[in-house]
């Protein structure tokens, strides 16, 4: 992995390159004009992790840079500051390092530090060790929590010590409302909060006018899109396989007073089987699928994208909102989806500035007359 070189002066140029690449790659589908959503040029990641490198009496944060031509060639890079990470993370990095250097209890066999922060400055720090954590560690970690105004979790093999909370609360203004999201340690959340807000706003806009119909959402995570879009639909059924994410999604629905959405713990493949009547059982019965009239499906799959069977399932809906973290697999999936649907909105979200990665949003409408 190459460590991004952040240079705000070059941000506009690097984004222009991404834009031209996406336009070129997707030209075969004749999409509408690409909508481009910019990121802050620095300090855009609200979460990140570092190894702790020990050298004699010193220690420092480290990341590893791999030579793409020789994957076995891995270079250790010292990170005293990290302009990719939020300002809160950069503020905490030297403060925590100083605390580690001053305390043998906190530094001994410290292996990794993980940060999870919010736009408002909340910070959850996970300290990962190669040794059991004892009472002396807990006492010093609690004192450090109080001194820095943070939350700390200690991890080692078969240990997870939550000193105060295991989550932060992110607050995003979307569509004139403030939405709140519980984000739990060691579970997936969107790393770039400003781009997350742009994605939610875009999805809210493109799904307007659906109040008499229902939304089904696959790979809903912690309810990121569920919470934001519920007001556009009569009812929402969201599915997710991770127990932790399902629990967070339900917390987030309650925190935002969303009463017309249900989250089911089920994989996309299982849900497809349930729709076809091929899967039965308690979880399927609780969904009460017969009560829904789905007009729209929202899918936010992992980097591997969707398999052909899942694409065929999506093709049965009138409208598809596809959020993709991998344009390459999106290209493959659109080869199938555009046989029944046409692209009516197309967006680029610069989730990871100064890297080749970006996210795309596609709205597809069913072509009249397709079976």
Image: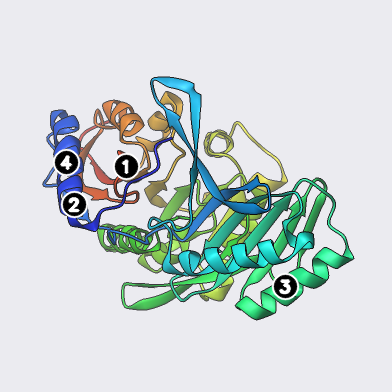
Q: Is residue 253 visible?
A: no
Q: For mark 3, what is the residue? A: 164
Q: For mark 4, what is the residue? A: 17
- Quadrant assignment for the C terminus: top left
Q: Mark 2, residues whose alpha carbon is within 10 Å: few (<14), some, or many (≥20)?
A: few
Q: Which mark is residue 355?
A: 1
Whole-angstrom CA distance, mark 4 to mark 2, is 11 Å
Residue at 42% x, 54% y is 215
Which x, y percent locates residue 110?
71, 51
- The way the protein has been coloured in the rendering is rainbow
For label 4, the SS is: helix
Whole-angstrom CA distance, mark 4 to mark 1, is 11 Å
Asked whether, in this view, residue 71 is left or right of residue 50, the answer is left
Asked whether, in this view, residue 50 is left or right of residue 369, the answer is right
Asked whether, in this view, residue 7 is left or right of residue 146, the answer is left
Q: Mark 1, residues whose alpha carbon is within 10 Å: few (<14), some, or many (≥20)?
A: some
For label 3, the SS is: loop
Q: Are marks 4 and 1 in contact (CB under 8 Å)?
A: no
Whole-angstrom CA distance, mark 4 to mark 3, is 44 Å
Which x, y percent locates residue 42?
32, 59
Q: Are marks 4 and 2 in contact (CB under 8 Å)?
A: no
**Farthest residue, direction right:** 135
Q: For mark 2, what is the residue? A: 10
Q: Nearer the viewer, mark 3 or mark 2?
A: 2
Q: Quadrant of residue 161?
A: bottom right
């Amino acid at each position: 992995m190459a460590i991004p070189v952040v240079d705000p002066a070059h941000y506009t140029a690097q984004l222009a390159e991404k834009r031209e690449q996406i336009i070129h790659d997707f030209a075969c589908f004749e999409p509408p004009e690409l909508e481009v959503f910019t990121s802050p040029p620095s300090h855009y990641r609200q979460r990140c992790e570092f190894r702790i490198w020990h050298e004699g009496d010193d220690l420092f944060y480290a990341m590893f840079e791999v030579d793409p031509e020789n994957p076995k060639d891995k270079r250790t890079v010292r990170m005293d500051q990290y302009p990719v990470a939020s300002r809160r993370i950069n503020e905490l990095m030297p403060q925590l390092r100083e605390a580690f250097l001053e305390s043998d209890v906190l530094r001994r066999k410290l292996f990794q530090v993980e940060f999870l922060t919010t736009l408002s400055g909340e910070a959850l720090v996970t300290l990962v060790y190669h040794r059991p954590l004892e009472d002396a560690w807990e006492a010093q970690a609690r004192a450090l929590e109080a001194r820095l105004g943070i939350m700390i979790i200690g991890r080692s093999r078969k240990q997870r010590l939550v000193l105060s909370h295991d989550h932060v609360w992110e607050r995003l203004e979307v569509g004139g409302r403030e939405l709140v999201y519980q984000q739990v340690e060691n579970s997936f959340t969107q790393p770039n909060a400003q781009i997350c807000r742009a994605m939610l706003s875009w999805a809210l806009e493109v799904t307007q006018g659906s109040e008499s119909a229902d939304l089904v959402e696959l790979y809903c995570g912690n309810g990121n899109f569920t919470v934001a879009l519920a007001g556009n639909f009569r009812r929402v059924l969201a599915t997710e396989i991770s127990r932790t994410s399902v629990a967070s999604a339900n917390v987030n629905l309650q925190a935002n007073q969303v009463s017309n959405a249900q989250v089911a713990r089920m994989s996309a493949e299982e849900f497809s089987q349930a729709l076809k009547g091929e899967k039965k059982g308690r979880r399927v019965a609780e969904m009460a699928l017969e009560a829904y009239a789905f007009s729209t499906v929202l899918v936010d799959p992992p980097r591997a994208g969707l398999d052909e069977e899942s694409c065929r399932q999506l093709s049965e809906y009138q409208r598809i909102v596809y959020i993709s973290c991998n344009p390459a697999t999106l290209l493959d999936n659109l080869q199938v989806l555009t046989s029944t649907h046409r692209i009516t909105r197309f967006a680029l979200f610069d989730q990871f500035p100064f890297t080749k990665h970006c996210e795309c949003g596609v709205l597809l409408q069913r072509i009249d007359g397709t079976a």
